[in-house]
Image (cartoon, rainbow, N blue to C red):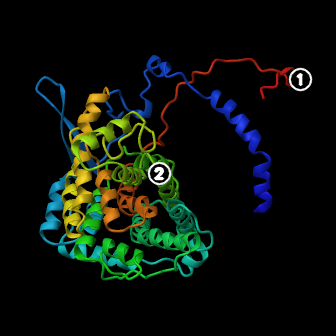
Amino acid sequence: MQKFERVVAQYADWMSQMSEVCSASTVIAPSLYETYDVKRGLRDINGKGVVAGLTEISEINSSKTDERGNSIPCPGELYYRGIDIRDLVDGFVREGRYGFEETAYLLLFGSLPTTDQLSHFTTMLADFRRLPESFVRDIIMKAPSTDMMNVIARSVLTLYSYDKNPDDISIPNVLRQSIQLIAQFPMLSAYGYQVYAHYHSDNSLIIHKPSPELSTAENVLRLVRANKKYTPLEARVLDLCLVLHAEHGGGNNSTFTNHVVTSSGTDTYSAVAASLGSLKGPRHGGANIKVSKMFDDLKATTPCTDEAIRDYIARLLDKRAFDQAGLVYGIGHAVYSISDPRADILGKFAKDLAIAKGLESEYEYYEKVARLAPEVIADKRKIYKGVSANVDFYSGLIYTMLKIPTELYTPLFSVARIAGWSAHRIEELANKGKIIRPGYTAVAPHQPYTALDRRADRA
């Protein structure tokens, strides 16, 4: 390894110099996207996605069509298999049950489970909630990483080697693999963090076994906390976070990635690892970490008054506060405009958790930013649709109140979203679609080949 690092150092100056050449050779003039009518990011100027497929897994609505055919923004709607997310959440909350397991069942099989079906599915998850013998020691502990998403992706790819039929993409086998991964993701996340905390932060190494009697949310808290203890409210709020992050249409980056990779006919572990790589990006799964860090800066520098917070938001937009990126993290969404239904639901439970923990003053900052940011953004920016708080806005606050380490924020997203990825993978396989291969228009000018001895040195 030291020899390899010497090689890296040897070529560092060359890499730095040639990176400018590399970048310059690939920059495309923004005007060409208009010339060729290319939708950057597969979205039009209003943020509406280019339709690339059909799905029955979930539905997202942010506008309605009036009698004249005009698209009118409306409060956001989210449906899992045709069921309004608000009704789904209201159902299991009202009955005092955990909801993630029945949500995973709904996404996989298309209907809500009966009492017996839910019991059987929950028992099956508990039975699958184990890792191969010595996997933690040989795989997770062998090369501890500073990034938990890297640990999960590496672990998922390694699980391929422990599967007797890893390349069998028949629906029964993929369903078995999917349920296995839904069950294993809490352990891959928690153990990856515990090993990181031990080797990189000099903490005690804590490896708890999951309990078959507990829900996914309860097991996450049990695995992460040294004393294994949690309150019923803590577990129920975390369970709600998992439900709301479990699925969000086929067009989100990590799920679309899963469709693309699945369409090639590859194995489940490769498809899921690809989705994990997408989710790791700060523009996707890492957003709630940015929200938490932004609020840390806000609370450290700004009193909790409307006037002061308006000024802070304005300075964020002017690139004069926090990370100078010009963004108000947690506000706005690629699809929703008036409201994100997940944020509406999560905000109420975040308030309950804040009251229970005596953190009302913490919640007040979030309430004020959620109310004031859309007004400030509308004043300072030309926007084509409204903005509002998104799900990441409140999930970061909840994870902070649950004292979950920031390193686990995005992994927790994957613990939930593996249910949606699995449903979409099975949907892609069941429909036997073509390999997904969109077109790109080439805009580089043609040039003649130049003999080696006649080429000018560019660097």
Taking the image as shown, residue 139 lies to the left or right of residue 57, namely: right
Quarter of the image for residue 176 reads: bottom left
Q: Residue 106 appears at what percent x and percent y? A: 26, 61
- The residue lying toward the viewer, choosing from 389 and 372, is 372
Q: Residue 194 appears at what percent x and percent y? A: 50, 73
Taking the image as shown, residue 129 lies to the left or right of residue 453, namely: left
Neighbourhood count class around disc 2 (C-alpha, 10 Å): few under 14, some 14–19, many 20 upward: many
Q: Is residue 189 above or below residue 229?
A: above
Quarter of the image for residue 447 reads: top right
Of the numbered discs 2 and 1, the one sitting upstream in the chain is 2
Taking the image as shown, residue 16 lies to the left or right of residue 405, namely: right
Q: Residue 71 appears at what percent x and percent y? A: 20, 29
SS of the residue under disc 2:
helix
Residue 262 image label: 2
Neighbourhood count class around disc 1 (C-alpha, 10 Å): few under 14, some 14–19, many 20 upward: few
SS of the residue under disc 1:
helix
For image coordinates 77% across by 21% down, the residue present is 449
Q: Residue 254 appears at what percent x and percent y? A: 43, 49
Residue 453 image label: 1
Mark 2 to mark 1: distance in Å? 46 Å
Residue 46 visible in rendering: yes
For image coordinates 42% across by 80% down, the residue present is 226
- The C terminus - image quarter: top right
Residue 430 visible in rendering: no
- The residue lying toward the viewer, choosing from 166 and 34, is 34
